[in-house]
Image: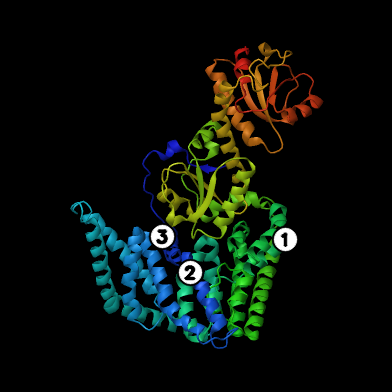
Amino acid sequence: MSENVNTTATQSAPVAKKKVGVKARVQKFGSALSNMVMPNIGAFIAWGLITAIFMAGGWWPNADLAKMIQPMVHYLLPLLIAFTGGNMIAGHRGGVVGAIATIGVIVGSNIPMFIGAMIMGPLGGWVIKKWDEAISDKIKSGFEMLVNNFSAGIIGMLLAILGYYAIGPVVAGASALMAAGVNWIIQMKLLPLANVFIEPAKILFLNNAINQGILTPLGIQAAASAGKSILFLLEPDPGPGLGILLAFALFGKGTAKASAPSAMIIHFFGGIHEIYFPYVLMKPALFLAVIAGGVTGTATFSLLNVGLKSTPSPGSILMLFIMSPKNLGNYIGLAVGVILATLASFVVAAIILKRDKSTDTDDLAAAQGKMSDMKGGNTATASATDAEPADVIASYKDVDHIIFACDAGMGSSAMGASLLRDKVKKAGINMSVTNTAISNLKDEPGLLVITQNELADRAAQKAPHALRLAVDNFLSSPKYDQVVVNLKARDQVSDAPASAAAEPQATTDTPDALPANLDLSVVDEIVFVHHDGHLGTATMATSLMKDRVKKANKHVSVKNLGIDELTDSNSLLVVSSAEAAKNLKTRYTQVQVLITDDLLSSPKYDKMVSELK
């Protein structure tokens, strides 16, 4: 099993700066925009629900409660975005200054200032950070609080004035220009062409940047005046992805076919669109299918005048209907658009899958192994195939918590963390497994970072000294099992000697427990047998035994073989578990067998090695 893993030894050296490509820069910029919006999605949903329920023509109109709508969209949401942006740069202090600065662009304009907040929030955080760096060592003792409070207030005031007179008008003009452009595109019936770019960009992990960074601010401006906006449907439409998964469920092969039905449920009802990305990337011709689905869905929404009150997050079909205005025609149009998008994507995908006669990419796990090359996402991380298993175990020595890092820190990374957390718990390992946005990643001691191949370079920049693992798909990576094996092996290697020394009589697995019928003087080969998927443990045990034999200056080869690959000879010593030994005895009569409960560090090994020739 191949892993893109960085050992702690590798990470101790200074990390050379790599040239950042255009796509990485775009991803980083888009991630910065979406990271200001995503933590505040709850507030956007609250505003959308209040609007949909209490506005005139809503589900339950209420003029008094509807008074919350305008203050929320004009003040609350932009200020939350600004605070989050400033907080990303300079913590809580940066968030406060960013929010103060943003009030200038808010009161200086009559449109919701989301784009202005995305500018002023980080700007406020950056300015106060630079100010603090410049004067932190010049403040006399006892005056820290006075200087810090007044500097934040003064800088915030000056930036608010700058926002009111300079940045606000510019942003308002740019927003009006963009809104006019979008309206022209809609009037000219050209909006469906946007999906020619949106669908491929989603699959290249720019989905959050497109939706939260661009479409959501423009959509909210439109919805504030029109009551709904089609822009909220361009990226979250689940139809294209559902069509892809449905085609795999009917016409796919191997693991892809078997996993597609469950993926459909997660995608369509859970709203985790990232789950279908690997299915498209394993057969790049399927980009045509998602484009067809996206164009069809948007064309239908446009023709039937369908829109949503606010951004649906996650992009679940349930959330789409919740965010729909209380209008039967909108509900019907929404359903028709999603269905037609699904059918268009399905038809194109089905044709591609049925015409594809290849067999090397039929298995999803094998295809995921090629995803990083296809997407240009491979990094210069050390691979487990290039390191001895003992070294891989050693690299996990200090790991005490695991963090899944993705673009926005929600959705697929949360599900990946949940999957591994369950595996770790079942293995009896006490380990924290959480998720976060990659922009919030910190270079902490004892950290194992798991991220997608596309984001591996950024993970290396944010946490250069952490142990890092790059996976193709958070939701179905086989590397999670290897992580669990490595952690268990790490614990066994570190705990076994201590426990053996402390309680030598507490176990029957002692150095004196070698079978009497073993003749180790004739043994010239030691074999660890792997079975039932326990390849990782057997491989590591082989590496550890090689080191032990070499240190003892014994001339015996050590191998890791399957049970069908053995030679029936008494010069062969097979080390196995009791379960595997049952099969050995039915197949071979000459091989010598040593049974142990601990393949990695059995106390029998010292006695065994000493008796080798």
**Residue 91 pos. (x, y %):** 36, 58
Q: Name the residue under label 2.
A: 212
Residue occupying image coordinates x 38% and y 60%: 88
Q: What's under tag 1, amino acid-wise?
A: Ala
- Any mark on residue 249, and which? 1
**Residue 596 pos. (x, y %):** 68, 25
Viewer-closest of 566 and 10: 10
Would residue 212 be found to the left or right of residue 294 on screen? left
Viewer-closest of 183 and 395: 395
Q: What's under tag 2, amino acid-wise?
A: Gln
- Whichever of labels 2 and 3 marks the residue nearer the N terminus, that label is 3
Badge 1 element: helix
State whether residue 579 is above or below residue 199.
Answer: above
Q: Can residue 325 be seen in this view?
A: yes
Q: Quadrant of the N terminus?
A: top right
**Residue 185 pos. (x, y %):** 49, 82
Would residue 77 be found to the left or right of residue 330 on screen? left
Q: How far apart are marks 1 and 2 (CA)?
A: 31 Å
Q: Is residue 473 visible?
A: no
Q: How busy is the neighbourhood of tag 2: few (under 14 within 10 Å), some, or many (20 plus)?
A: many
- Whichever of labels 1 and 2 marks the residue nearer the N terminus, that label is 2
**Quadrant housing residue 265:** bottom right
**Quadrant housing residue 269:** bottom right
State whether residue 175 is above or below residue 512.
Answer: below
Q: In which quarter of the image is the C terminus?
A: top right
Viewer-closest of 182 and 413: 413
Q: Mark 3 points at which residue?
A: 25
Viewer-closest of 518 and 202: 518
Q: How busy is the neighbourhood of tag 3: few (under 14 within 10 Å), some, or many (20 plus)?
A: few
Q: Distance between the residues labelled 2 and 3?
A: 17 Å
The residue furthest right is 586
Q: What's under tag 3, amino acid-wise?
A: Arg
